[in-house]
Image (cartoon, rainbow, N blue to C red):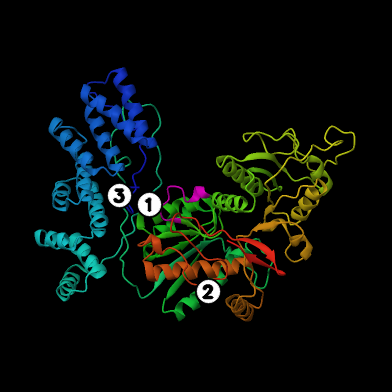
Amino acid sequence: MIGKGIVVSGLIGLSVLTTGHAQPSTDAQRRYRAAVGLVQTGDYERAKTELNTIIQRGGAVAPYAHYYYALAAYRQKKFDQARLMLRQLADRFPDWPKQPDATYLLGVSQLEEGRYDDGLKTLDGLNDPTLRADAARAEQTILGRATDLRALKQLNRTYPDNRIVGLALIELIQRSSSDRADLELSDELTNRFGVPGTAAPRLTPTTSASGATAQTQPTRTNRPATPAPTRPNRVKSSYNVAVMMPFRIEEFTNGKRSRSNQYVYDLYNGMLLAKTKLQEEGVTVNLLAYDLDNDPNKTLELVNSPAFAQTDLIIGPLYVEPNRIVSAWANQNGVILLNPIATSSELIQDQPMSFLAQSSLVRQAEQVAGQAQSVNSLRRAAIYFGNTRKDSLLAATYRDELLQQRYQIADFRRMGPTAQATAASLFKPVPRPGDSMSGASTPGMSTPGVAVRPGSATAATPTPAPAIGHVFLSSSTDTDGPRLQEALSSRRVNAPLLATASAFNMYKNGTSTFSRRDLYLLYPDYVSSDREVVTTFNQTYLAERNTIPSVFASEGYDMLLFFGRQLAKNGGLRNRDAMRSDTDDYLLSGFDYTQANDNQIVPIVKFDGGRFVKIN
C-alpha cells in the first residue's frame, strides 16, 4: 500500500521482446528476472541493487530495469528516487515503446511528493485513453488527501478549469476552514463543478500469463494500481450499509428456529435494533440486505451495479471467493468491509479496508499468554485441545506464541474420550511443532475412542508431571473443561487453567466447577447479563421478535452501532486513533481497531462472587 487507498498490484510475466530489438544475454535475462522477482516479493532494496547493476551494464533490458527500479522506490514511498530514475529513463531511452507507462508513474510520483503542478503537467501529456482515465483517478485520490489549503488554492488559480482540482479544494475547505472567503469560494466551485462524490470502477477477474518470458514489461497490471477515491469527510444525511449474507430466502419458513443459517437472521435482527438506536442519536442508517451465498458471479454483478456504488459500509460476505471480490471493491473505493464472525487473520492481511468484528486467533493467543504470565511467571506450559479444527488451530497458535516468548511446552495433545484416558496420557513424549495433531498418528498422544488398559503400551505407570506454570485448553466441546479438570486433579497438577469458555457449559456446570481451581476463561462472546443496557436489549428483542436473543443478535447490534457511529463521527477511517468504543452502552465488551484490523479487545473472565467478571 502506498499511502491511504493506493494499492500497488503484483507483477505478471507478459510477452518477450519483439524481433526488432536485440535479445538480452542469458546472464542479463537471468539477473533481470531475479530482480523483478525481488520486487514482486517486496524485497525492494535488494531489487534496486540488482537493477542498478543491470542499468550500469546497459543493453536491451536496461530501460525495463529503470522502470522497475522506479517502481520499487515508489512502493517504498521514496518518490524522489522514483522521479529521478524515471527522468533518467526518459533521457537515455526517449524512444522506448513503454514510455507512456513510465510517464504515468512519473506523474503519480510527482503528485505524491507534493509537486502538484509538475504532476498535473506530466499526466496531461498522456495520450492513451486508458492511461488518461487512470491518471484522472490518481489525481482525484492524491489531491483529495492534500492538507495544504494555500497550495490547492494556487493550483486552482493555475488550472481554473480542472474539475478534479476544484473538487479537491471543495473537500479541503469543508474539512479544514471556517473562513468566510473560503466558504464562498467553496460555494462558487460547487456551483461550477458539483458536489464531490465517488465513482465505482468496474471490477473484472484478473489472470496471470503463463510460460517463461524473456522479461517482464510494464503493463496496467504492474504499474501502481489506480488509487481508490477517498470518501468525502462530511456528515451525510444517511449511510447505506450492505449486509451481504446467505439469507436463503427461498428456504425461509417463518417461525422455524432450526435453520442452519439462523445465526444470519439473528445478526440481522440485532442490526435492526441498532439502526433504531442510531436513529435516536441522529444517525440514519439504511440497511440493504443482499441474499448472497457462495456465488462469485452474483457477487460481481452486485458490486458492479450502480446502486452499490453508494455503499458506505459492507457487512459480509461469509464465503471466501465472494469475500475476495468484495474486498477488492472495498479497497478500491475506500469502504470498510466487516466480517461479522471470522477469526482468521488471513482475511485482513494486506487488506486495508477489511476488518474482523471478532478478535483473530493470533490476537486471542497473545492476550491469553499475557494473562498467563501475570498469574504465574514459570515459563512452562501444557496445552490441550478438542476435536474441531478451530480447537487445534487455536492450540497451535497459542503454542507458537508461547515458543516466541521462550516458554517450554511440557505437553501438547488432543483431549482423550474420558477423564481417565486423558489423565493417563498426560505428559507423554510431546510431538514437535511440525508434527501432526491427530491423536491416532502422533506418538505420545492419546487415541480418541481407545480405552487405556493397565499393562498396555499407553497406560501402566503415568509419566511424572513436571512443574507447570499454567495449562491451556482450547475446546468447543462443553464437557472437555470439567474432564480436563478431573484429569489434572488426578495427576495432582495444581497449576492455573486458562481455557476457552466453550469448553464449559455455563448453564449446567455447578459453581464448584468454576471455583475449585484457579480458572480463567477466554470468552469473546461474554455478555454481563446484570447490566442495564443488556436487560433493556433483551426485553426489547423479546417483545419485538417473540424469542430470547442469541449472542449473534447481540453481536449484530454492537457491530452496527459501533461502525454506524464511526461513519457519522469519523468518516470511516479518517482518524485511526478514534477507532475504538468510547461509551459503555455495548452489549459485549466493545471494539478497538486503533492498532490493527481485528478487534483488539479479548475478554478474559473469572468466576467471582457467584458470577463471571471480566478481569482485563
Marks 2 and 1 sit apart, C-alpha to C-alpha, by 39 Å
Of the numbered discs 2 and 3, the one sitting upstream in the chain is 3
Q: Amino acid at mark 1?
A: Leu
Residue wearing tag 3: 226
Please report the residue visible at 53 percent of the width from the left and 69 percent of the height from the top.
Answer: 558
Horizontal and vertical percent position of residue 314: 45, 62
Q: How many marks?
A: 3
Q: Amino acid at mark 2?
A: Asp
Q: Give the class, few, some or many, for how many residues have Cα within 10 Å of label 3's Cα (few <14, many ≥20).
A: many
Horizontal and vertical percent position of residue 506: 72, 64
Res. 512 image quadrant = bottom right
Residue wearing tag 1: 203
Check if residue 346 falls in the magenta segment: yes
460 left or right of 520 in image: right
Numbered label attached to residue 144: none
Q: Amino acid at mark 3?
A: Thr
Res. 211 image quadrant = top left
Q: In the rendered image, is residue 465 in sight?
A: yes
Q: Magenta part of the protein: which range? A: 345-354
Marks 2 and 3 sit apart, C-alpha to C-alpha, by 40 Å
122, 375: nearer the viewer: 375
Res. 503 image quadrant = bottom right
300, 315: nearer the viewer: 315
Residue wearing tag 2: 585
